[in-house]
Structures are given as structure tokens and as C-alpha cells.
Amino acid sequence: MREAPDAIVFKELGQVFKTDSGSVEALRDVNFAVKRHEFVAVLGPSGCGKSTLLRCIAGLLAPTSGQVDVFGLPVTEPRDDIGIVFQKPTLLPWASVEDNVVFPIKHKTGRVNQEHRASAREMLKMVGLEGFEKRMPAELSGGMQQRVGIARALLLNPDILLMDEPFSALDALTREEMGFELLRIWQASPKTVLFITHSINEAVLLADRVLVMTGRPGSVLCDLEVPIERPRSIETTSSKVMHDFSGQLRSLLLKRAA
Amino acid sequence: MTSLDSFAASFSSARPKVRALLKRLPPGRVRLVLLPALTFLAILVVWELAARVFHIPSYVLPAPSRIASGFDSIPFGRWVEHVWATLRVALMGYAISIAIALPIAIGLTKSETLSACLYPLLVVIQSTPVVAIAPIIIVVLGAEDAPRVVITCLIAFFPLVVSTTTGLMATPPELVELSRSLRAPIHREFTQIRIPYAIPYIFSALKISITLSVIGAVVAEFVAAEKGIGYYIQFSTSLFKLPEAWAGLAILMVMSLGLFQLVALTQKIFFPWSLPK
């Protein structure tokens, strides 16, 4: 029997943007693969094309060279089995929390039934927002809003979850808390996750593998397995192995920058 | 103690009393209504006194009591006819402006080509002094409501187009990406995301445009009409009946204010989330 294809495969992907002041090469020769239900963090300085990578997988942006395969098929348009969590929660301010979570279905099909609402409530329970269904987004804290954003991305039960610096707009403490929450959610419902971040600690705590990127044009500098066993907890953050690995990543990133 | 001293003393002793009285007013809404109402009343009193004491001729500045008597110059039924004539043109012009502005704004948002074609034209229309073009429109379209409605539209629709377009463009790009990633039909990008996002912008334009509509209707009546408050003001001034003209002006102000509040109330009732906290 043939082996199941990887969830995401980048093949010689390149992306050039044309602007009024000439063309900008955002990505060059990006090659890597993500296995199903693997948690991969993409770590790099701002402006290294991390978000562009994500948009290529989501089918929102056609690469100028090379291709991205998702489950063995080249991406030519957006797929149903991919959920996206953005940097900002970007909820609809006029809709209740529950209506925000069912929004993808309402938007795609034009209607929502009780079954969808039930699964939305289940998602909200999973992200720790039980009892907040009827609240409005403005009544929630930044962390809670992003939980709604995650529930919205999980609603269609996607196989792949793309997260574009989802916690970077949060304060430091909430950010750490949300990291552990994401670990819990991911263990409860395994997904292939591509997690874009510029926080070394976040990448190490959450991911199975860390891709370190360099900027302009962006490409993958190295691909490292995180040598920390699961399940991970608050104790993990103060362990020696985490400390050493973070240090290794830090010197990689800063040496390139210097 | 001289009488002046005692007056000053009673005044300074009255100040804490006034302050205490103000403090006793219910906080919030009532206070917000009562204070400006009292201020307005005070201005009327000062105005009345000034007009009487200084014998200001009524063609320069009639006293409020003279203006009030201006309301009696024609029977109530005639007032209703005038008000209805102006209100009808203002509301028709307003409705048509909205009906024209929304599709144009959507077109400008969605197509850069259309935007390049239309935008300069819109600016040209906006820069044309409507008062100057009004007589031409009246000649072209005749003496019925039609030319007056067109003039009203010309004044009222531009802020609607600009503000609605700004609102449609102000949608977070992530939500547009979410819409695309769901491969949703394009009309839902507007009905479920962009238009609701533009609601605060649309309502600020609706508030401006409703008062502009009244101005448009009045301008049109100045040029050619045989009914309407604008017509009545012009007619009264031509006969030097200034208190009557001021009475007409007062009615126009109440009309504008009332319509503005109606729009504000609509937003409050149907789109409470769109109001700033």
C-alpha cells in the first residue's frame, strides 16, 4: 500500500511581488514537508515572508514559482479542510460569540441549522468559553476574543490549522496562558498545525519541529526537531533542555541578523 | 451696607445654592437635556429683552414674541401644506440619493477601473455650485417636484458615496481573506462583511445628508416653487414681513433637527453595536 501523502509539502516555492517601485522577492526556494497531525512552528524575523507561506497554503495567493501540495494535490484554490487563525481575532462586532463561531458556515452556505449551532457551542466549550455564547465580542478580553477566533477556525473540523502569529497582539501573561491552552486543544483534537511566530519560547513550547527562516528573500535556514517530550506543561518552560534549545535557536536567529 | 453690597452678598450666597441645585439634578440624561434647554431659554429671554430695550426694528432682528406672532399670519392648514411640500421633496431626494449612492459605493470598492472612471466625475458634480445649476435644472425638468428632487439629490448624495466607500474599504483585510478562503459567493462578502462594517460610516453620512436634503429642497424652492417653507420665506421677505420669514426659518430648523434625530434613533435601535462606546 502506498504511504499516505504528507499534509503540506513545499516544492521550490518562490514568491515575487510586483510593486510600483520594482519587484520584491518575498520567498525563494522554500522546501519542507509537514506530516499529518504534526505541529510545526515557523520562526523568523518580521518581513521574512512567513505570512506569505501561509497564504500560499491557504490558496489565497498563487506562488510565482514552485508549488505547494496539500495531501498530495497542488493548491490552486482555497480548500475546505484548512482553518485559519489570524493575528488579530477579527470577529464581527455586530454578532454574538456563537454567531461569530458559526459565521464560516453561514458565509459559505447562507444558512445555519441547529446542528451547526450545537457544534459551535461544543467548540466554545473546548476553548474554555462555555457560558459566553450570547456575549458580544466587545465584552470579551483580547485573549477571550482570540479563543473565539480559534473556535471559528476549528468549526469546520479542518485537518490543517494555519495560525499567523495568533497570540502576538496579547499581553505577555495572556500570551503564555494561551500557549498552554493551545497545547490542550491540540491534544484534545489533533490537527496538522503550521504556527507562525517570532517568539522563540512559544515555538519551542508548542511545536514538534521548528523551521527557522531568514529574511529577504525568505527561505528556510534550518529545520530542527524539538527534543522535548510530550505532554508538555508549565514545568517544561523551566527545564534545562528547553533552555538549551531556545538558546540554540536564539543564536541562530541573532547571528543571521548581525 | 449699601444696596449694591447686599446685592453682591445675596448673589454670592446664591451661588452655592445654584450649585447645590445643579448637583441635585438627576445625573446623566436628564441633566444632558435640561442644561442645554435652560441655556436656550436664557438666550431667548436675553434676545427678547434686548429687542425691547434697544427698540431693534423687526426687519433687523424681530423679538422671539414677534416671531411667534409670525406663525399666526397664515392658518395652520397652510403651514401644513408648506411643510409637507418641503418635507416631501427632501425625503424623496434623500431616498433617491441613498438608492444611487450605495450601488456606486459598492462599484467603487470592487472595481479599480470603475473607480478611475467615476471618481473624477463625482468630484466634478460635487464641485458644481448647485445653487447655480438649479435654475437650469428647473427649466429643463419643468415646474413639478422632479427638478426639486434632482437638486436635492445633487446636494445630498456625495457625502453618502464618499463615506460609504470609505466604510466598505475599512473592512479588516483578514475578514475578506476569510471570505475568500471559504470560497463564498461574492455578494455575501458585501452583505455579511463589508456593508455591516460600513454601517457606522454610512450612518454618519446619513446624518449629514438628511440635513443637506432639507437645504437642497429649500434651495430648489428659492428658484421656483409656489409652495414650501423655502418659498414662504422668500415670499415673506419680498414683502418685508421678516417675523413671518423667521417663523418659517424656525420651522425649517425644527424639521432638520427632527429628521436628524430620527436617523440617529434608527441607528440606536437597529445598530446599537455601531455606536461609539
Image: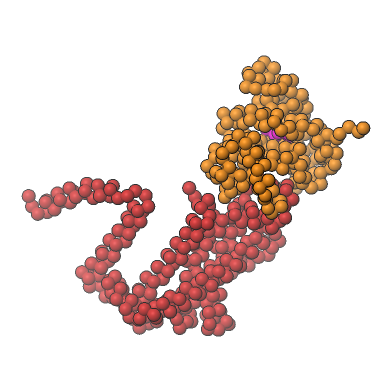
Left or right relative to B176: residue B15: left
Residue A11 in view (yes/no): yes
Residue A39 in the image, given as x and y percentages of width and height:
74, 30
Q: Is residue A33 above or below residue A66?
A: above
Q: Which residues are magenta?
A: A193-198
Residue B219 in the image, given as x and y percentages of width and height:
47, 75
Q: Is residue B45 above or below residue B12?
A: below
Left or right relative to B20: residue A145: right
Q: Nearer the viewer, residue A2 or B249?
A: A2
Q: Quadrant of residue B245?
A: bottom left
Residue A43 in view (yes/no): no
Which residue corresponds to the image point at 57% horizontal and 28% vertical from the top-left?
Answer: A173
Q: Is residue B218 magenta?
A: no
Q: Residue furthest right?
A: A1
Tell me the chief SS of the magenta region. strand
Chain B, which colour? red
Q: Quadrant of residue A142?
A: top right
Which residue corresponds to the image point at 26% horizontal and 75% vertical from the top-left?
Answer: B57
Which residue corresponds to the image point at 61% horizontal and 28% vertical from the top-left?
Answer: A176
Residue A227 in the image, given as x and y percentages of width and height:
74, 20
Which residue corresponds to the image point at 66% horizontal and 36% vertical from the top-left?
Answer: A165
Chain ID, orange in image: A
